[in-house]
């Protein structure tokens, strides 16, 4: 009896470890994607900003400033748009990852429920057989 309990515990522990490894892999892949997206967006925003500041440093009179100013507004608008787009993409990827993790958890719960049900049926059948013999 103790051996059966030990085997069940070992199997459950192994299954839990495998599931945890799958979940961790998905979470790390998502974190890697998120970091890459945010880093590339930051790089693009910084490059655009420094390019504008380089043009702005060359301004020597009011007429040149009037010509450069719309470019600054355009750079700011594009920076905000890129940031919002990246945030939406990060959110979408995170939702997909969480859904995948949820499916893994659901599968584990369903498998555990099926195993428990099967084991309960087996025990009930043994009890019935023992009771009918006596």
Image (cartoon, rainbow, N blue to C red):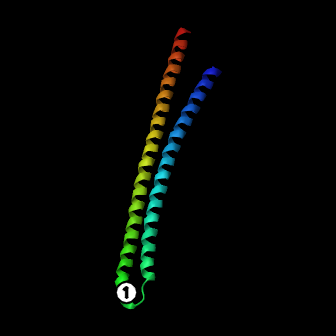
Q: Is residue 82 left or right of residue 122?
A: left
Within 10 Å of the Cα at label 1, are there few (<14), some (14-19), or many (20+) other Cα atoms? few
Image x and y of residue 101, in percent: 46, 44
**Residue drawn 42% across and 79% down?**
55
Residue farthest to the bottom, as pictured: 62
Q: State the image quarter where residue 41 is shown.
A: bottom left
**Residue drawn 46% across and 39% down?**
104
Residue farthest to the top, as pictured: 133
Image x and y of residue 44, in percent: 43, 65
Which of these two is toward me, 111 or 134? 111
Q: Quadrant of the N terminus?
A: top right
Q: State the image quarter where residue 12 is shown.
A: top right
Q: Does dot 1 land on a helix, a strand or a loop? A: helix
Up the image or down, 130 lies above or below 42; here it is above
Count of numbered circles in the view: 1
Residue farthest to the right, as pictured: 2
Image x and y of residue 90, in percent: 43, 56
Q: Is residue 8 left or right of residue 101?
A: right
Which of these two is toward me, 114 or 19? 19
Which residue position holds label 1? 64
Up the image or down, 1 lies above or below 21; here it is above
**Residue drawn 43% across and 41% down?**
103
Which of these two is toward me, 109 or 98? 98
**Residue drawn 51% across and 43% down?**
25
Q: Quadrant of the C terminus?
A: top right
Up the image or down, 133 lies above or below 58; here it is above
């Amino acid at each position: 009896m103790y051996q059966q309990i030990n085997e069940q515990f070992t199997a459950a522990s192994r299954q839990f470890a495998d599931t945890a490894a799958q979940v961790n892999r998905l979470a790390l892949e998502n974190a890697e994607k998120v970091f890459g997206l945010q880093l590339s967006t930051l790089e693009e925003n910084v490059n655009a900003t420094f390019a504008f500041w380089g043009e702005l440093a060359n301004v020597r009179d009011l007429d040149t400033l009037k010509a450069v100013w719309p470019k600054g507004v355009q750079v700011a608008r594009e920076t905000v748009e890129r940031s919002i787009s990246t945030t939406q993409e990060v959110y979408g990827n995170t939702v997909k990852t969480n859904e995948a993790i949820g499916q893994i958890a659901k599968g584990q719960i369903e498998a555990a429920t099926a195993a428990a049900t099967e084991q309960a049926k087996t025990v009930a059948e043994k009890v019935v057989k023992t009771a009918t013999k006596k």
